[in-house]
């Protein structure tokens, strides 16, 4: 667990909101994406030991992909947490808010990502 100050969420949220607004996403989808982004950034800080997680926003032909990088090579476990556990529900939130999510190992650490499809 990282014991340094928490990462700033404001710049990442504003950049995502701007990109999604310019790409024509509905405000409800943007709000869901911002919440999912915050969850991934906090996970990267808390569980990935990364004080300043890297955030990538990619506008694809049919979707937007948001990735958050951290220094841990431990891939997230999508199983339902124990009902008495104090944490572990954040990725369930990400799964419920987004169209797809996943994690990709990197040379150093991993990227955890989510996607929203563009409206047809």
Image: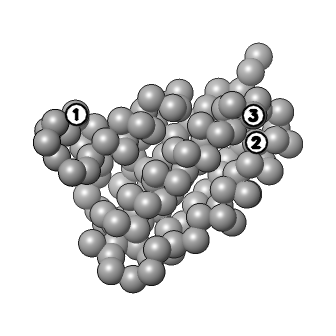
Residue at (46% x, 51% y) in the render: 39
**Residue 20 bears which disc, if any?**
2
Q: Residue furthest toward the bottom? A: 4
Q: Total number of numbered labels?
A: 3
User: In this image, 117 relative to 109: left or right?
Assistant: right
Q: Say what secondary structure mark 1 lies in.
A: loop
Dot 3 or dot 2: first in sequence order is: 2
* Image mark for residue 19: none
Q: What residue is at 40 percent from the left and 68 percent from the top?
A: 45
Could you tell me which quadrant the N terminus lies in? bottom left
Residue 116: image x %, image y %? 61, 32
Disc 3: which residue: 27
Viewed as shown, does residue 111 lie left or right of 82?
right
Q: Residue at x 58, y 71 (%)?
A: 8
Which residue position holds label 1?
A: 80
Q: Earlier in the sequence, mark 1 or mark 3?
A: 3
């Amino acid at each position: 667990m990282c014991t340094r100050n928490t990462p700033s969420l404001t710049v990442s949220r504003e950049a995502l909101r701007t990109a999604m607004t310019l790409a024509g996403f509905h405000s409800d989808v943007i709000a869901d994406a911002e919440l999912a982004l915050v969850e991934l950034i906090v996970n990267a800080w808390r569980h990935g030991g990364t004080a300043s997680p890297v955030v990538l926003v990619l506008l694809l032909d049919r979707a937007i992909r948001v990735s958050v990088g951290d220094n841990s090579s431990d891939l997230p476990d999508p199983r339902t947490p124990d009902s008495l556990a104090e944490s572990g529900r954040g990725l369930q939130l990400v799964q419920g808010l987004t169209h797809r999510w996943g994690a990709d190992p990197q040379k150093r650490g991993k990227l955890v990502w989510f996607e929203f499809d563009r409206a047809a």
